[in-house]
Each structure stands twice: as structure tokens, then as C-alpha cells.
Image: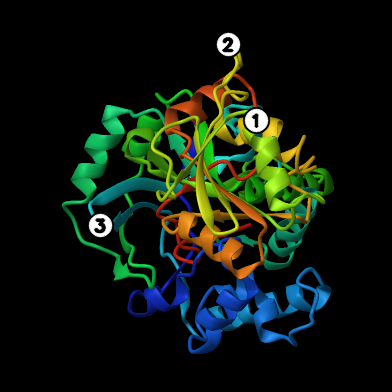
């Protein structure tokens, strides 16, 4: 793999915790408003600039992108975001409870993604890609890193241990209880050489932002008659983690109605295709064990894959889609159907129960998490998972490292 140091923007050390924000797509408008209310430095003022405009503003409007650029420039002009003195890589450690993961932050080649050397496992929604691409064009920057993984390489692990014995750049705990620790690396050659031994990187989180980086890069290549391949727009910002350190949490489904069925009729149809039993436990304990919340009651469903199913068809997300969501509830496309919503992370099962019990959801499903090895194998096979199949936790913060194009 080809990686590169970069001379980017980063927050001043004293205000890094205020600038760093959750990724744009893991907070609702209301949550973004709350996080920004008493924090004028949050990167959400750039990533979700609609928080600074009237409530009925279209989040994909020109006014939002213009406000994002204004806010981004203001952070720089007031000295909250500063330019590094020299090209650097960074080690980025995330810690929550007993879980720790340490990734290398740097730039990856766009054409490695386009050639499939950086592998994906999920299709993208064109509307979301176009939105983030326009923001990238306007800002001329990647403000949040893509989350990549790779099969462990011992040399990289050893180099990381040496760096972590040195001086910290950032160390703070975010509002969700995650500790974020960063070391800056200026002697980068050992890391770039070590990554040459790694045959592939894999997209863990950030498919839409990677696709939008590719789109903007293609546009700039085509419009630059002096294109050489060395320009900054040929690279995108990423944090690369060893696969053994990663943690995947559930990504659950909530359906707003029962497709014209009563709860009793729906439950009868589910019983006709699988084992169903009442339970008080909302979280499944193994693959094939799916929990369903209907009318406030949890049920355990057993959906076994058919013999010979390929790696994707064996996923619980696919079994649920193929046997219940599509044939019974009429959900054809999880990416676009407005009747389905998603809840991921540490409180995913509780979120399902709240939605159903409040009446906002008619039925919800709690799923067992996909494993990292499943993700790698599916990507190696050139296949795609259903949307919202993996929720990696903890989440990277946006705004700690910014790559300008």
C-alpha cells in the first residue's frame, strides 16, 4: 500500500477537544444543534452548517455549503486551526473502557481505491455522495478521516509502540466517554516502507466520503491540463487500524409500519418461516439469533442460512431482508425506503425498544454484529454487504486532522 505524510491543518492543542466532533452522519440535526449550542469551535459548524441557519434550511442547499466555508475560514483566521510546519503522520489511539485501538493517520492514493487495492464492502447512496462531494469542492479539504483496516503487520505494530513512548500531541475525552490520544510523527519513512508490505487496505467506515473523494479527484484530473499525479487531490485522508484491534457493534433495524398487517397477522407470518419464542433478552448471543420487538415484547427468531449460501447471503442482515423485510413487510431497498430506520452502537437494542414503545416504530430487530473477518472475506470476494451492516465503535473524531487539496 502507498501512504504519504501530509502538511495539513490541525487544532491548537488547547482547544482540540472543542474542535473535534463526531462524524457528520452519526448525529441527527437535533443532536448536532445541541453539541454546537455552547461550542462555537465544533467542526460540526463546518460538517453540518445548517445548524447555523434557519431550521427549515435544506441541508444540501448552496447556503449551507457557503456557511460551511465561512465557518471553516473563520476557524483558520482566528488561529483555532493551524498549519503543520512539515509533513507528518499521526498515531491515533481510541480508548473506551478496556477497549483500545491504535491507527496510523496519513494519506492514501485515490487510484488504489479506484483499482480495488483498497477494498470496499458496501454500495453507496448517490445523494449522500453528491452532498459530501460538494462540501469537499467548496472547502477544498477532507475534514474527517476515512476509517480503514488491514490484516496485522508486525513491523507497523512495533513502530507504533516506539512512537507511543514519546510526547503526546492531543489527549482528551469526548462527551461520549471515548479517550482520544494522538502522537505526531515527523520521521515517516519507516512507516511508509512498512505499509509497502501490506497488500490491501479495507474500508471499514466512510464509503460515501471515499467515493466523494474519488469523484472530486476525477474532476480535478480532467480539468487540470498539467496533471502529474503528484497533486494533493490524488490522495485522501485516512486512519488505518490493524484488524485484530477493531470492535464491531450491532446495527439494528426499525420499521415504521407492518405493511397493512395487524401485529397478530404479522407475528403469524413470521412464525410460519422460523422458530419464534418470547424472551426478555433484547441482545442476540450468536449469528442466526435475531431478536424482534413487537408491541413492546421481545421475541427470539432463528433464521438459519441455507446450505451453500455465499458469505453475504449468510449474514443476518441478508437473512432478515430476504425472509422478513422484503416478503412480509415490503422493504425492497434498505438504502432508499423511508419506512426503515437504523440504530447502531452501544445502546442499539435500547434504541429499538424506545422507538417501538413510543409508537414511532411498529417493529424492530436487534442483530448480532458482523465480525471483522467476515467483512475482510466479503471484500476479498468482491461482494457487498447490505447497507448499515457494520457499526464500528468507537468512532473517529472529525477535525483533528485536515487534508487540504
Horizontal and vertical percent position of residue 226: 77, 45
Vertical placement of residue 41 versus 311, above or below: below
Asked which secondary structure carries label 2, the reply is: loop
Q: Give the residue pinned by disc 2.
A: 307
Q: Are marks 2 and 1 in contact (CB under 8 Å)?
A: no
From where the camera sits, is residue 145 visible? no
Counting residues from the start of the chain, the first of labels 2 and 3 encountered is 3
Determine the residue positioned at 34% across, 74% down: 13
Q: Nearer the viewer, mark 2 or mark 3?
A: 2
Horizontal and vertical percent position of residue 270: 65, 36
Q: Of all residues shown, which one is farthest toward the left?
A: 165
Asked which secondary structure carries label 3, the reply is: loop
Determine the residue positioned at 39% across, 41% down: 241
As measured in the structure, the alpha-carbon distance from the residue carrying label 2 to the one carrying label 1 is 20 Å
As measured in the structure, the alpha-carbon distance from the residue carrying label 1 to the one carrying label 3 is 32 Å
Q: Give the residue pinned by disc 3.
A: 97
Horizontal and vertical percent position of residue 312: 60, 25
Q: Give the residue pinned by disc 1.
A: 384
Kindly identify which numbered label has been placed on residue 7.
none
Horizontal and vertical percent position of residue 368: 46, 39
Q: Residues within 10 Å of mark 1 (few under 14, many from 20)?
A: some
> Looking at the figure, which quarter contains the C terminus?
bottom right
Amino acid at each position: 500500500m502507498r501512504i504519504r505524510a501530509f502538511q495539513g491543518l490541525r487544532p491548537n492543542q488547547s482547544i482540540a477537544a472543542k474542535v473535534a466532533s463526531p462524524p457528520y452522519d452519526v448525529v441527527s440535526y437535533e443532536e448536532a444543534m445541541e453539541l454546537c449550542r455552547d461550542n462555537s469551535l465544533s467542526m460540526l459548524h463546518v460538517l453540518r452548517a445548517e445548524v447555523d441557519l434557519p431550521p427549515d434550511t435544506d441541508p444540501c442547499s448552496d447556503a449551507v455549503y457557503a456557511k460551511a466555508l465561512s465557518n471553516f475560514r473563520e476557524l483558520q483566521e482566528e488561529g483555532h486551526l493551524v498549519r503543520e510546519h512539515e509533513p507528518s503522520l499521526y498515531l491515533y489511539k481510541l480508548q473506551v473502557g478496556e477497549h483500545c485501538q491504535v491507527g496510523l493517520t496519513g494519506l492514501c492514493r485515490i487510484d488504489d481505491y479506484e483499482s480495488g487495492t483498497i477494498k470496499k464492502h458496501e454500495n453507496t447512496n448517490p445523494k449522500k455522495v453528491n452532498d459530501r462531494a460538494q462540501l469537499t469542492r467548496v472547502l477544498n479539504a477532507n475534514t474527517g478521516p476515512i476509517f480503514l483496516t488491514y490484516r496485522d503487520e508486525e513491523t507497523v505494530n512495533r513502530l507504533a509502540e516506539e512512537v507511543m513512548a514519546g510526547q503526546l500531541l492531543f489527549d482528551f475525552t469526548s462527551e461520549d466517554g471515548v479517550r482520544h490520544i494522538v502522537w505526531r510523527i515527523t520521521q515517516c519513512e519507516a512507516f511508509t516502507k512498512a505499509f509497502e508490505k501490506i497488500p490491501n487496505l479495507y474500508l471499514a467506515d466512510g464509503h460515501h466520503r471515499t467515493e466523494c473523494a474519488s469523484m472530486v479527484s476525477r474532476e480535478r484530473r480532467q480539468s487540470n491540463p498539467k496533471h502529474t499525479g503528484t497533486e494533493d487531490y490524488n490522495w485522501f485522508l485516512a486512519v488505518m487500524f490493524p484488524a485484530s484491534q477493531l470492535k464491531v457493534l450491532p446495527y439494528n433495524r426499525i420499521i415504521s409500519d407492518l405493511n397493512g398487517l395487524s401485529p397478530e397477522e404479522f407475528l403469524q407470518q413470521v412464525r410460519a418461516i422460523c422458530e419464534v419464542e418470547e424472551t426478555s433478552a433484547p441482545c442476540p448471543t450468536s449469528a442466526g439469533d435475531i431478536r424482534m420487538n413487537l408491541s413492546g415484547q421481545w421475541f427470539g427468531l432463528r433464521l438459519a442460512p441455507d446450505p451453500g449460501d455465499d458469505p453475504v447471503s449468510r449474514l443476518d442482515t441478508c437473512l432478515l431482508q430476504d425472509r422478513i423485510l422484503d416478503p412480509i413487510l415490503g422493504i425492497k431497498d434498505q438504502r432508499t425506503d423511508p419506512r426503515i430506520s437504523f440504530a447502531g452502537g452501544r445502546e442499539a437494542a435500547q434504541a429499538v425498544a424506545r422507538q417501538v414503545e413510543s409508537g414511532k416504530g411498529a417493529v424492530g430487530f436487534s442483530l448480532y454484529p458482523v465480525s471483522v473477518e467476515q467483512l475482510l472475506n466479503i471484500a476479498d470476494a468482491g461482494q457487498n454487504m447490505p447497507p448499515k451492516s457494520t457499526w464500528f465503535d468507537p468512532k473517529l473524531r472529525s477535525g483533528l486532522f485536515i487534508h487540504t487539496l
